[in-house]
Image (cartoon, grey):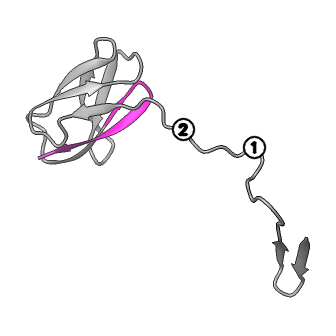
Amino acid sequence: MLADNLLSGFLSICLNGPTTLLGATAPTAGPTLTLYPNPSHGQVLLTLPGFALTAQVLDALGRVVRTVFVAGTNASLDAAGLAPGVYAVRGAGQVGRLIVN
């Protein structure tokens, strides 16, 4: 049933039955970039969901502060020397959050 309200400009739709939208699917979680241990202040194991040559560490302003060379899908990231804070780690089309304490 459709009903309109000409004064307010709204259109109302009343459904009699299931309210599942056709063609709508819930997003599925795929493989993700992982960082362990996190938070950290030393060595961090970086695991990527796919092949990449490098991964980048970005600060809060989006500047690349470190580039890590990846062997396949794993890398070791040295967080020593990074100022305490939150960093983004980008690689293989994924982005993860690294907390340095």
Residue 9 picture quarter: bottom right
In the picture provided, is 5 more to the left or to the right than 73? right
Which residue sits at x=40%, y=32%?
32
Q: Amino acid at mark 2?
A: Thr
Q: Which residue is mark 1?
A: 23
Looking at the rendered structure, the kind of residue marked 1 is: Gly
- For image coordinates 33% across by 12% down, the residue present is 72
Residue position for label 2: 28
Residue at the extreme top:
71
Question: Residues in magenta?
Answer: 89-101
The numbered mark, 1 or 2, whose residue comes first in the sequence reads 1
Q: Quarter-wise, where is residue 63 in the image? A: top left
- Residue 22 rendering spot, x and y as whole percentages: 78, 47
Q: Position of residue 85 (x, y in %)?
A: 18, 49
Measured as percent of width and height from the top left, residue 20 is found at 73, 54
Position of residue 31 in the picture relative to residue 8 (left or right): left
Left or right of 88? Residue 77 is: left
